Image: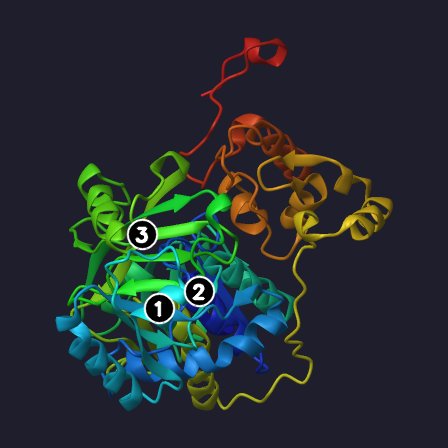
Amino acid sequence: MLDVIIIGGGVIGCSVARSLARYDLKIALLEKAADICEGQSKANTAIVHGGYDAKPHTLKAKYNVLGNQMFGTLCTELDVPLKWNTSLVVCFSEDDIPKLEALKKQGEINEVPKLRIIGREELHKREPSLSPNACAALLVETGGIVCPYELTVANAENAAENGVLFYRNAEVTKIEKGDSCWVVKSKAGAFETKAVVNCAGLYSDAINAMVSEDAFKILPRRGEYYILDKKYADVFHASVFQLPTKLGKGILVSPTVDGTVLIGPTAEDILDKSDIRTTPQGLAKALKFGSLTWENIPLRDVITTFSGIRAHSDRDDFILGEAPDAPLFFNASGIESPGLTSSPAIARDLADLVAERLDAKENPNFNPIRKAIPKFREMDDLERAKAIAANPDYAKIVCRCETVTEAEIREAIRRPVGAQTIDGIKRRTRAGMGRCQAGFCTPRTIQILCEELNLSPLEITKFGEDSKLLHSYLFGKGEQRHA
């Protein structure tokens, strides 16, 4: 029997897995998709928020500030890039300056340090590319940027290295009360476990409803984004927000930790949790409001657009802790922004709570250190020569836009919780994320996946299920068509 099953392989589930691995417990994580980080964690604004925006005395406010304070150590331990680039909340009319002051006061109630209102002169000195109409801003010195999928993968790898079992394509279909345990039935089999942690994101309401009468609803909220080419990496230094609305923090313009520029998101309440389309209306809105911050956005250098779905709950706050009518069933639900920032603090507190209820002892062998795959694009000439001498696959560039080598792709597959799909490779190495958006590297990536996983090219998928890229062979073996 397992001690703990975690449902959901997003940033919250993988962070909880890593935090629980600090205890001497038998743990498994079940993810419904073909890979971890296939849900909302893969598509968000990638910001480490300061914590000024959350309503005081809420769980969002508490965990935002605590999580922000943990990110430095976390990213050092997991070897994940993090940049403290600051955040700015700008206004375009002096009539709105009192709203900035109210936001600053709210942040101070939340105990966010280093908040300051800055005027036009300092604002434009900091951000020369900002619209001349911007007249003041709230400066948040504890704002940062991080890659959400790299962080999720790093948490998962470190958890696996410390003994956590990962099951993918393992959608949970039913949870029943057994003899002194929970029986979790999934597409990967049935598991007996003493405790369950529900980190199922958009579907956490359905998982909770399997065991608890204390119901809540997750209301999907879609946000649409543009990503611009890396040649604009230095146009903005801070993450530049506009005054928030009741639907969220508004449209931002921000550099990413990988060097591209992000514009978005919109905020649209929708009915279908799986509807991740971008729409002409949504992109037009992102462009309209983004242009208030950055006039004449260079649309010719947009390399892609995407949307993400936020798991907004009908309780308008995070839902954390043990369900009142289901002993040893724990929820981490309604985790929308600032969920990424809050993830390490949520994971720590949930893990401590679960361990306390199970009377678990600390794991004396827990190792918090995880090393990232060495990135050829970040090496100097001497480092590249050494890397190639140690592994000749470092001399084979697969993704020209992002300078990703065959060595990096093979290691991404071979690692714990390794990549098994095209998108899995992309999120672990950035192969396919550059200007050509995988137009060049996809065939070679398919070939490497086939070699490493002993699969036919016709079995390789973009993100699992029915997302196969190839239908049949044209020559030789392809004379026989495949389904």
Instruction: Name the N-terminal-most of marks 2 and 1.
Output: 2
Amino acid beneath label 3: Trp
For the point 60% across and 51% down, the residue is: 418
Q: Tag 1, which secondary structure?
A: helix
Instruction: Name the N-terminal-most of marks 2 and 3.
Output: 2
Within 10 Å of the Cα at label 1, are there few (<14), some (14-19), or many (20+) other Cα atoms? Answer: many
The answer to whether the residue labelled 2 contacts the one labelled 3, judged by CB atoms less than 8 Å apart, is no
Q: Which residue is at the far left?
A: 95
- Nearest the viewer among 197 and 414 is 414
Instruction: Name the N-terminal-most of marks 3 and 1.
Output: 1
Amino acid beneath label 2: Val
The reply to whether residue 198 is in sight is no
Q: Quadrant of the C terminus?
A: top left
Amino acid beneath label 1: Leu
Please tell me whether residue 473 is drawn above or below residue 96 in the rendered image. Answer: above
Within 10 Å of the Cα at label 3, are there few (<14), some (14-19), or many (20+) other Cα atoms? Answer: many
* Number of residue marks: 3
Q: Give the side of residue 44 with respect to residue 104, left or right.
A: right
Q: Position of residue 217 (x, y in %)?
A: 18, 66
Mark 2–mark 1 distance (CA, rounded to whole Å): 33 Å
Q: Tag 3, which secondary structure?
A: loop
Q: Position of residue 127 (x, y in %)?
A: 40, 62
Q: Position of residue 104 (x, y in %)?
A: 27, 82
Where residue 161 sits, quadrant-wise, is bottom right
For the point 63% across and 71% down, the residue is: 162
- Nearest the viewer among 222 and 88 is 88
Within 10 Å of the Cα at label 2, are there few (<14), some (14-19), or many (20+) other Cα atoms? Answer: many
Identify the residue position indicated by label 3 in the image.
294
Identify the residue position indicated by label 1 in the image.
123
For the point 40% across and 84% down, the residue is: 114
